[in-house]
Image (cartoon, helix red, strand yellow):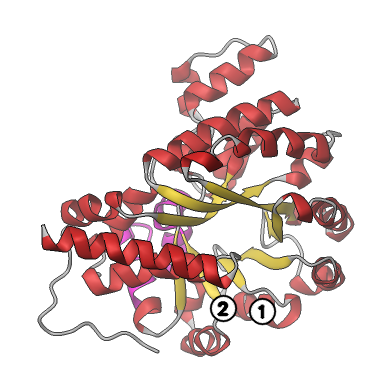
Amino acid sequence: MAITPAPDEQPFSPDRIVSLISALPKAELHLHLEGTISASTAVDLAARHGITITTEEASQHYAPGNFAQFLEAFKWVTSFLRTPADYALITERMAEQLISQNVVYAEITISVGVMLLRKQDPLANFEAISQAAAKFEPRGLKLRWIFDAVRQFGPIAAAEVVKAATECVSQGVVAFGLGGDELAFPAADFRSVYELAADGGLHRLVHVGEIGDAASVREAVEILGVSRIGHGIGAINDPRVMDFLAERKVTLELCPTSNIRTGALALQLGNPAAKIARHPLPQFLRHGMQVTLSTDDPAMFQTTLVQEYGHAAEMGLNQQEIMHLAEMSFQSSFLPADIKQRLISAMWTLQSSAARK
């Protein structure tokens, strides 16, 4: 159902929404573990392997650029992930960051395709990740995992990621995803890979429509059977695709700051000077589409989930819409229905309490 803002509802100021949303329990569904590596953590990881770099030198790799430059920066940062202990370290630091923002549930994407390329043992790495994450559940943070393949490595490599994922379902792996350069191979090349994932009990996700067109977003749903799409902002250029996504109830995982920093929004809008206020999130939401708000690679893009909600206010969303956006992050998760409802009820209870103050 499309949302029409009530005439007496005013958009939230960014400061007001940051204050409110900071206090609420939240879910984060599009977050790359490797993208949470801060410059200081990169320095620490490098030192473990006898490489000396300064925080200032590391920070240069996080500078704004285009999508190709982002992929190179991601490649550089992940080059310091060489042992299970390295993955445990970044998991612990990520979990602390999430808890500090009152995130209570997150589905974390792990670049297993990169691990395999580097001849690492993804199961050993994941065991270290799982053990590190378990320490945070008593503190109120539940984490689940998405094993991600790299599109430009091709379907055979992607099938190896699916195989690893199905071996870890009992340890909290809930989905298979496909990231990397979305223009590298057509969706049809991965049809059998996604069928394999479905047969293995995995939910299916894909990064598409970030720099690709609206047709590629529709193809991902029709050919790969995905229930959630990473980014998908290319859909803004075809109302028929927007209708299709709304009817199919396919969720778009939106990451506004990421889309600015990679140049994806400028590309989709055909405007090199496009600012975050032009992001299509409001249009998608008011069109009745299912959308969530996420950070993607928060350390690399210098953002937080709370700040992303502040950006939603900059786009003109009102209180009703922002709360609906926060609720959809729980609704679109792969949690059991009863747990979803409990977390949503807790969020609304706290919101009502805050509103009375």
The residue carrying mark 1 is 221
Part of the protein shown in magenta: 255-283
Inspect the magenta stretch and tell me whether residue 328 lies in it.
no
Inspect the magenta stretch and tell me whether residue 262 lies in it.
yes
Q: Position of residue 256 (x, y in %)?
A: 40, 58
- For the residues bearing labels 2 and 1, Cβ distance under 8 angstroms: yes
The correct choice, above or below, for 191 with respect to 75 in the image is below
Amino acid on which disc 1 is placed: Val
Instruction: Evaluate whether residue 278 shows in this view.
Output: no
Mark 1 packing: few (<14 Cα in 10 Å), some, or many (20+)?
Answer: many
Residue shown at the point (76%, 37%) measured from the top left? 127
Secondary element at tag 2:
loop
Amino acid on which disc 2 is placed: Val
Taking 347 as reference, is 67 left or right? right
Residue shown at the point (77%, 54%) measured from the top left? 170
The residue carrying mark 2 is 250
Residue shown at the point (49%, 14%) measured from the top left? 54
The correct choice, above or below, for 234 with respect to 86 in the image is below
Q: Quadrant of residue 345?
A: bottom left
Pick the front one: 13 or 201:
201
Chief SS of the magenta region: helix
Q: Earlier in the sequence, mark 2 or mark 1?
A: 1
Quadrant including the N terminus: bottom left
Q: Quadrant of residue 159?
A: bottom right
Q: Position of residue 192 (x, y in %)?
A: 87, 71
Mark 2 packing: few (<14 Cα in 10 Å), some, or many (20+)?
Answer: some
Q: Position of residue 325 (x, y in %)?
A: 37, 69
Q: CA distance from mark 2 to mark 1?
A: 8 Å
Residue shown at the point (17%, 69%) measured from the top left? 11
Q: Position of residue 140 (x, y in %)?
A: 47, 45
Taking 180 as reference, is 114 left or right? right
